[in-house]
Image (cartoon, helix red, strand yellow):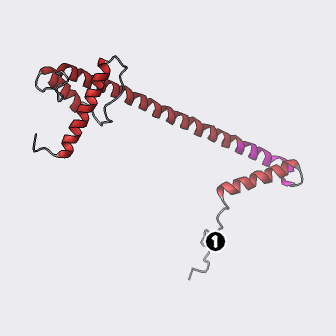
Amino acid sequence: MKNEDPELQSIRDDWERRIEDAYLRIRAGLPPEPWLPHLPTLTGIRRQVRRARAGIVKSGNPRIPTAAWADTIEQGIVMNMLLREEQRKEIEEEKRQGAERLQRILDYNRSWMEVYHALKRLPEANDPTTEVGAQVLSMKRELRKLRGRPKKRGKGGAKGDGGADAK
């Protein structure tokens, strides 16, 4: 271990410090706190706990008994899993709220368009001096702002009538 990479040794020391802090917290009777860093998988840590319980590996910290070391790590795993579950539920709730918000917007837009089309069918919609006509004109402007102006059509190019390009 003396020829070990200094960065790896720093990581190990950090882990042992975290484990010792959690162990001291348990011994003091304080409520547990999540102390494991966010890891993609906990398989390696679970394997270490099994090996420690089997007596294959010893505690990395001489001040903590191996069984207590394994219990502390196991408690950290449980806390980490609870924290992950809580975060997953928060993300799902945010997605659900976003979908509901989008549905409300779509419903509002749909009802707005229904009102617009109903107003356009009224006979007084063509007269801009009436209240209905002014409302239809205002709604038409709003639609134009959102959608933009329609594209111009070319001079007979769509029908293939032999315009300027034909020879």
Most extreme residue toward the bottom, as rendered? 167
Q: Position of residue 63 (x, y in %)?
A: 19, 24
Residue pictured at 61% horizontal, 80% vertical: 164
Left or right: 92 as drawn, with respect to 108: left
Q: Secondary structure at mark 1?
A: loop
From where the camera sits, is residue 123 visible? no
Q: Position of residue 50 (x, y in %)?
A: 17, 23
> Magenta region's main secondary structure?
helix
Left or right: 60 as drawn, with respect to 77: left
Left or right: 38 as drawn, with respect to 13: right
Residue pictured at 62% horizontal, 78% vertical: 163
Residue pictured at 77% horizontal, 44% vertical: 118
Most extreme residue toward the right, as rendered? 129
From where the camera sits, is residue 37 visible? yes
Q: Position of residue 85 (x, y in %)?
A: 39, 28
Q: Foreground residue, 33 or 127?
A: 33
User: Given the image, on which type of amino acid does mark 1 rest?
Assistant: Gly
**Magenta region, residue range:** 112-126
**Which of the 4 image quarters holds residue 165?**
bottom right
Q: Foreground residue, 55 or 127?
A: 55
**Figure check: 145 above or below 51:** below
Q: Foreground residue, 51 or 22?
A: 22
Position of the C terminus, as image quadrant, is: bottom right
Position of the N terminus, as image quadrant, is: top left
Residue pictured at 25% horizontal, 36% vertical: 14
**Figure check: 106 above or below 124:** above
Left or right: 159 as drawn, with respect to 1: right
Residue 116 lies in the magenta-colored region: yes
Residue at mark 1: 154
Q: Position of residue 60 (x, y in %)?
A: 17, 30
Crowding at mark 1 (Cα within 10 Å: few <14, some 14-19, many 20+): few
